[in-house]
Amino acid sequence: MFHTFPNKSKPQSPISLEKTYSLTAHYDDFQEVKYGSRYSSSTLSNGMSLHLGGSLDRSGRGRGGRDRCVGGGASPGGGAAERWSRREICLLSALVFAAGVCVILGCMLALKFLSLEAQDAQCREDCRARRSLLRAARFVQGNIDASVQPCHDFYSFACGGWLRRHGIPEDKLSYGIITGIGEQNQEKLQRLLEEPVRRTGLDSAERKVKEFYRSCVNIQEIDRLGGGPMTEVIENCGGWDFSGAPPGGAGWESGSAPVRPDFNEMLYRTQGVYSTAVFFSITVNVDDKNSSRNAIRIDQEGLTLPERTLYLGQDEDSVKILAAYKALMERLLSMLGAHNATVKSREILELEMRLANITVSEFDEQRKDISSMYNRITLKQLQRMAPSLHWKRLLDRIFHDNFSEEEEIVVLATDYMQKVSDIIKTSSKRVLHNYMLWRIVAALSEHLSTAFRSTIHEFSREIDGTERQLELGRLCLTQANKHFGMALGALFSSDLTGHGSNSSDLTGHGSNSSDLTGLVGFDPRSPTFPLEICSPALLPRQRKSRNRDPVQELVEDIKHALDVRLQELDWMDDETKEAARAKLQHMMVMTGYPEFLLKPELIDQEYGFDVNEKTYFKNILNSIKYNIKLSVKKIHQEVDKTTWLLPPQALNAYYLPNKNQMVFPAGILQPTLYDPEFPQSLNYGGIGAIIGHELTHGYDDWGGQYDRYGNLKQWWTEESYRKFQKKAECIIKLYDNFTVYNQRVNGRLTLGENIADLGGLKLSYYAYQKWIREHGPERPLPGLKYTHEQLLFIAFAQNWCMKRRSQSIYLQLLTDKHAPEHYRVIGSVSQFDEFGRVFHCPKGSPMHPVNKCSVW
Ligand SMILES: [Zn+2]
């Protein structure tokens, strides 16, 4: 994925003093259009005001007439005996004259109205285009800090203005331009969830997701139940220390007496009923060596904290985090009725520490080489490998099957499984049991009453600085997204297409994204900005792109850029190039949202479990159980290559190596990452670089191990792979030298993402060059001195304008596979020669070093 967005992001640092220079310097340009637009609606071309019925203009003219009359009256020779006095004649003339002027003006007005009708359509087009350019200019300019030299620190140059103006909301760990886009999505989704149910049937997924949401925001009811729902789970599992008798005893081991669950029974319950990994994970996934079938996959996983080193007390921060974790466990255990919570939590922690000792870090070399991790063995071999568990019984129960001893299973952590079996063998059954119960408690307590939520929040505050819990509505939206992603996605998509219309030409690709332009989250600066010049309601949204989806076109251009790059590479031999190009040809791309979302009855089938608006905790359990059921079913099914792992509202994208597939949900195809009305330079720098990023994942240190069909198979010649690794080594060193708050970035952990960032930028740049060759240069952005080549780089950097709480950096550097945003940007641009050329950076300047790393 191009980025993961934590549910909670973060703090309000010194809020942004607005700088006054940025927009005012170009204010005239904005003014010009502002007046231009008024002119078309209320003034004449000669600048005369149209207040015809009003007294002002007429009186003006009248004054003029009178002046002339006065002059005429002064002339000698008028007949004294006339019936009309000179004064009367003068007045009459003035009246006649005024009437004439009125007639002329009236005609002009009528003509103007007629011509306005004709011009209206043209005007709307023009002013819409102009409005878009201004919007783009204002967005780009508002984020820049022009006092920073782009060749010195491009991130601070491109994002300085934004960083100064924004703080981090108290309930978030980070906040960025992209978070702002996400908030627009969230507001829309929340509104959709609060609308009345349209399909009210018992099976209706729409009803279920809305009732689920209602059950979640009903905090009074949740508080009334307190820890009750969890106590029930604990009792069903035999209680702490095995003390309680499970109800009914059905399925429990230990002869005829339904007394206590034995170890294997409890293992089944945690994994097969509550979907909680204990000691190891069991999942159903595409078999990496045969991507058309699903396989049972077993891997290391038994820790509650996100990284093993946090258990090892290697530095001050990890010691602090471990202490906070122990306090949390103790507190939750007491709240849930465990006696001697202090002793119990110490025992559980000791067991987790033993597991941490045998767990391998995700950035360890061993965990990078999927080919050597992959180990397909039979059930019989697994039993020999980890003999303290009863494997057949466990898998039979989870999968409702009767596996033969020859059944094949993929094990990704062979050493670990041997060692974990030893730990199980040598640990007290009581402690093993309490550990498994704790893992369920740790996974589910966030769904309990306010008291539990506050306790968990205390822990978060301690370890990453979260100031405030997420607001209830937002938290429930997060849960609805997690448990009802596609049902919510259906509401989102039908909102895009106009409430469930059958416009299937909008599905399965990104043209629908043009309907999202109204969601733009621009900064509310410059209140005088003439956004009202054309009423958005009157504008026909972009439908012209229906024939050829512009997002698909962008993807094709970027794929083409990689194809050309592959042919040009001097370090890759012909054989490997051919395989790499074939992989590119086979790569599947999905954008927008899946077509089945337009068919409500198909969505209903995804949520075949009960939901009640009064029972939040039970709804969660039902959802978990149903998802286990779906996974279990997959084991007997062919791999469905069209499954979406993210719902359409997701502000994210992914590349899946074992399907050789890229997916860009509608949620990310939005301004300011993508706007069909923006100049293409900004779109290529925005979503283009993200598409390039995902594409490059197919060729990084992980994705590059899979072939065109998604099978784990070496398609590189040895020589080319060795050269690739050498090039990757350069990137590891580059990022190893970056530090945040005196903490080092881990070049090895972030390698794949960094290769993708560097590659994505290059591909989008070259693809834009091709676009220019085919379409000609773009109009300059009003009031900006930057060329479109420069704007592409600026847009790329502005994707990543982001603030993070300093307290969260420690965990981020330890667990996030992406480098901190500042380095995602300067790491990428500084290694690209074209950047130095475009910004005229002196050779040897920080953003244009003499020696550069380059893979693609
Ligand atoms: Zn990525």
Image (spheres, grey):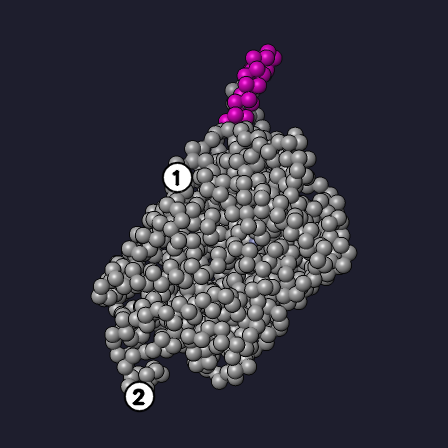
Q: Give the number of the mark in front: 1 or 2.
A: 2
Instruction: Please tell me which residue is depicted at 26% across the width and 79% down the height of the picture.
Output: 245
Could you tell me the amino acid type at mark 2? Ser
What residue sits right under mark 2 in the picture?
Answer: 256
Say whether residue 235 is visible: no
Q: Secondary structure at mark 2?
A: loop
18 and 741: which is toward the camera: 741
Could you tell me the amino acid type at mark 1? Ser
Distance between the alpha carbons at the discs numbered 1 and 2: 63 Å
Q: Is residue 191 left or right of residue 231?
A: right
Q: Which residues are magenta?
A: 59-81
Quadrant location of the N terminus?
Answer: bottom right
Classify residue 287 by image quadrant. Answer: bottom right
Residue 710 position within the rendered picture, expressed as x and y whole percent measured from the top left? 63, 66
Instruction: Please tell me which residue is depicted at 54% across the width and 18% down the height of the picture.
Output: 67
649 and 713: which is toward the camera: 713
Callout 1 crowding tier (Cα within 10 Å): few <14, some 14–19, many ≥20: some
Main SS category, magenta section: helix
Instruction: Please tell me which residue is depicted at 58% across the width and 42% down the height of the picture.
Output: 734
99 lies above or below 616:
above
What residue sits right under mark 1 in the picture?
Answer: 13
Instruction: Please tell me which residue is depicted at 50% across the width and 70% down the height of the picture.
Output: 298
User: Ligand 1, what quadrant?
Assistant: bottom right
747 lies above or below 830:
below
